Amino acid sequence: MKILQRSRPERLIWENKNSGVTVQVWEKEDRRELRFGNQIMQSVFSTVKPDYLVLPYTRFMLLGLLFCTEPKSVLHLGLGGGSLPRWLHKEFPHIQQTIIEINPAVIEAARRFFEFPLDKRLSVMQADATQIITKLKLKYDLIFLDAYGEYGPPEEVTRTDFLQNLSNCLNTGGWLVGNLWTITGNFMKRREQWKSTFSQLFQARANQKGNIILFASPNTKVLDMRTFQEISKNLHKRHKVDFHKMWRKLEVVI
């Protein structure tokens, strides 16, 4: 796909080094990338197709809609360029979303360069999620955990006690969706932490190496995999995203 090619010249259009992390926005033809001072793409935005989720792992995180097709309240931990909350904001006119992002430079970049909307249905909190998660008053239908630094997630957001706090923030029937890396050497340990915390756990590999998405719930009601096939067809028709193809990558973690 053209917007995933990296052969053309790129230019740095914005940089902030005052937040403890070098936050950069790079531009090349019809795309912009958020990076943290290295070549790792934290977020990618198409200037010609702003509603398209460029990175495959972001599309696979939408498989959370298989478990909750009509979310009313969503919590995001980590903003990046705001791809997921921007997409959900457009597709679900009545959804209320809260985003917790520790780095003020990331928030500035999302708003200035990635068309992140300013709207009362989107609440952005500049805070450390590990410090305030137990203070949140609301419960959520879906929680997306995608908090990353320069080379991976902070250790604090991977711990079992933090996962339990997230579980406590879910509505009855709510689900946690997490983006995990397989190339850091600790994926199996982290997945086991999820398994020990939640009653149900699914996973889907978003690409050949790198991203595996986990889907977890404290709900003990076991879901039938055959049900997902019909749900995926309906989601595909409604949202024009290939849920019917992606759901085939979904598997139960046992």
Image: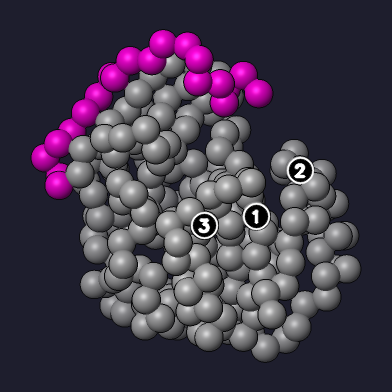
Which residue appears at 37% of the width and 76% of the height? 159
- Res 54 label: none
Residue 33 lies, with reference to residue 224, above or below; the image says: above
Disc 3 designates what residue?
182
Residue 205 x, y percent position in the rendering: 65, 55
Q: In which quarter of the image is residue 24?
A: top left
Q: Earlier in the sequence, mark 1 or mark 2?
A: 1
Q: Earlier in the sequence, mark 3 or mark 2?
A: 3
Q: Quadrant of the C terminus?
A: bottom right
Residue 12 x, y percent position in the rendering: 29, 19
Disc 1 designates what residue?
205
Mark 1 crowd level (few <14, some 14–19, many ≥20, 10 Å Cα):
many
Which residue appears at 65% of the width and 80% of the height? 200
Disc 2 designates what residue?
242
Task: Decide if residue 62 is in sight here.
Answer: no
Q: In the orientation shown, which residue stands out farthest toward the front?
A: 185
Q: In the orientation shown, which residue stands out farthest toward the bottom?
A: 220
Determine the secondary structure under disc 1.
Answer: strand
Residue 30 lies, with reference to residue 192, above or below; the image says: above
Which residue appears at 36% of the width and 54% of the height? 152
